[in-house]
Amino acid sequence: MKNVACALTIAGTDPSGGAGIHADLKTFQELKTYGMSVITSIVSQNTTGVQAVSHVSLEMIEQQLDSIISDMPIHAFKTGMIANQDMMKLIYNKIKHLDAPYVMDPVMVATSGDTLIERDSRNYLRKNLLPLTTIVTPNIPETEYLIGEKVETDEDMKQAAEMLVKNFGAKAALVKGGHREGDAVDFLYDGSRIHSFSAPRINTNNTHGTGCTYAAAITANLSQGLPLNIAVKQAKHYVTLAIKYSLDLGAGSGPTNHWAPRIHTNNLTTTEVE
Ligand SMILES: Nc1ncnc2c1ncn2[C@@H]1O[C@H](COP(=O)(O)OP(=O)(O)OP(=O)(O)O)[C@@H](O)[C@H]1O
Ligand SMILES: Cc1ncc(CO)c(N)n1
């Protein structure tokens, strides 16, 4: 029996604290999960965008992974920003041996519109990493890239989630509707049925790091042993409250509020529709 759930994030940094590794570790902590991290790239960014990127060497990424894998329990893990194909290959070769749920946030572009991974590495991500995933959590532009088709309607989103499982080898897929208009509706295909999770759209520009926070909450919930659809449902509540009470910091798109879900526990506005 495990006495503490342990989760690992493999991702880039955000010194302004809203996205990447920082968002992940804050989420793990709030969800009573012991958080660990492997840094792939140091990203100088803030609420207005990305100013500079420095990649960690392959040797150092490998060493960080070895340090954790050789010593620490990993009950679930997630990947975020993996900037290029060499990093992806290295990470693939390490994580394929891990016996724990794998949540992939297929990060391509920051909320600000800045590109975070090299274009020609996207195919490697789709072909090699995607089939290892327990769940992949693309937003609409990432979904369109992964399946190679436009995604505009609810029906398109549901079909895309099914395709990511049936044609591309993910075990489950959560297609997120944050980039559409109207209610914020996400569709999960779990390998046998579609679930949809809906929340009223919150009128805010402070959505920096929402995708990281959501995927990290799913990872934390899976590390605690929750079934997938419950893990997603609770993570949707978490991210919705974190957006609802988001912090108006910085001149651009401000960060989510990680302690709001703890304080406003009775104010859950999300619903599982199907
Ligand atoms: N304004 C909003 N109001 C309510 N929920 C939102 C809003 N914007 C995004 N969401 C929800 O937040 C979660 C993250 O979705 P989104 O599609 O924004 O991810 P993302 O684009 O990967 O995030 P990021 O901006 O960090 O890259 C989803 O559940 C989405 O429905
Ligand atoms: C490091 C990092 N990962 C992911 C995102 C996407 O929000 C970001 N802005 N920065």
Image (cartoon, rainbow, N blue to C red):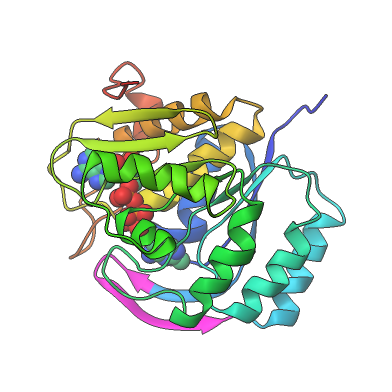
Question: Which residue corresponds to the image point at 54% horizontal and 49% vertical from the top-left?
Answer: 25
In the image, 8: left or right of 178? right
In the image, 72: left or right of 87? right
The residue segment tinted magenta is: 45-55
Question: Which residue corresponds to the image point at 43% horizontal and 27% vertical from the top-left?
Answer: 233
Q: Quadrant of the N terminus?
A: top right
Question: Which residue corresponds to the image point at 12% horizontal and 42% vertical from the top-left?
Answer: 203
Quarter assignment of residue 264: top left
Q: Residue furthest right?
A: 70
Please identify the dominant SS of the magenta region: strand
Q: Quadrant of ligand 2?
A: bottom left
Image coordinates of residue 235 in percent, x first then y, are: 44, 33
Decide if residue 184 is in sight here.
yes
Image coordinates of residue 84 in percent, x first then y, are: 55, 79
Report how many numbered discs are placed on residues in the image: 0
Quarter assignment of residue 201: top left
Residue nearer the viewer, 127 or 94: 127
Looking at the image, residue 157 lies above or below residue 146: above
Question: Which residue corresponds to the image point at 25% horizontal and 56% vertical from the top-left?
Answer: 254
Residue 50 colored magenta?
Answer: yes
